[in-house]
Amino acid sequence: MAGSHGTGVRFSLGPQERKLQARGTWCNQKFMANQQLSDYVGQQLRQGKNKEEIRTKLLGTGWQETDINHVLNATNSVQSSSPPLPPQQSSFTSTGMQQLDPKAVWLFFLHSVFMFLFIAIWIVFGFIAALTDSLAGTLEIGLLILLAFLVFSFIWAKLTYRFYRYELTDAGFRKELGVIYKKYVTIPYDRIQNVDIYRGILARILGLSDLNIQTAGMSATVGRFGMSGGGAEGRLPAVSRETAEQLRDELIQRARQAKNQGL
């Protein structure tokens, strides 16, 4: 056979085969060049360069704009399809029902005094003055009533603190309060819209904070001495600053997770 010597046979490539071989070599080189371009673009993006700076620099070195745009678009698709970050471990640990800060007793007591003391003084002195003729007797009786009012307010503040509890359950934020009549409130996490922290004058003096959990159709009024409306379902008064910030972050995180699961 012509062209055969020893153990091998040599075949000459025709024009079509040589064209395909050259195209394959070119495609291989093109792939390697694009891979290098992709690595370079990724490195520049990680270093904080913007896309316009990268595009201008590559155009100046002779790269085709179509190749540059292709690599930049591919980088966008990879970044957008990256998996979400796992939820961060919470710094707030709940071990059942929690009480307010112990200084809440003084906050409740001072709030009662400021709210009712001046009104009670005018009513009591006016009533006593109408029944007695002696001014000295009026002052003595008034002071006794004032002392009794302060003692009662302090005892009531202690009881309010003792029976005011809260916790974060799997279902939502839960609290219970009330001395004579008990009230139980549960707010599902998917109903929470926002969580705010307020510090009125008395709260700032005592180093306390009020937590306001905003839900649809619920609001609390913020006054000079803090939030008013003790029956507001989303109000948690008299917690420490650290606890308020931890609760706010935890509630926002759980609300976001509950809404994402509901989609």
Image (cartoon, rainbow, N blue to C red):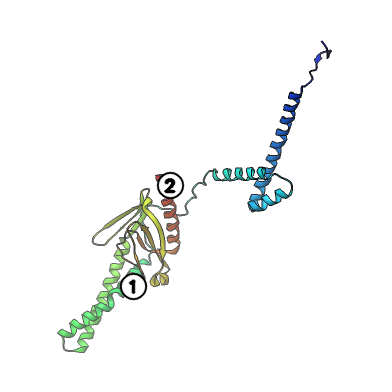
Mark 1 highlights which residue?
A: 110
Q: Residues within 10 Å of mark 1 (few under 14, many from 20)?
A: some
User: What's the amino acid at mark 2?
Assistant: Asn
Quote the CA–CA distance across marks 2 and 1. 43 Å
Left or right: residue 190 versus residue 40 is: left
In the figure, 105 relative to 124: above or below?
above
How far across and how far down the image is residue 181, in percent?
24, 60
How far across and how far down the image is residue 249, in percent?
45, 56
How far across and how far down the image is residue 37, in percent?
69, 43
For label 1, the SS is helix
Q: Residues within 10 Å of mark 2 (few under 14, many from 20)?
A: few
Mark 2 highlights which residue?
A: 260
User: What's the amino acid at mark 1?
Assistant: Leu
Instruction: Write the residue at 76% across / 26% down.
Output: 18
Q: Residue 57 versus residue 98: which sits nearer the camera?
A: 57
For label 2, the SS is helix
Q: Residue 229 versus residue 206: which sits nearer the camera?
A: 229
Quarter occupied by residue 174: bottom left
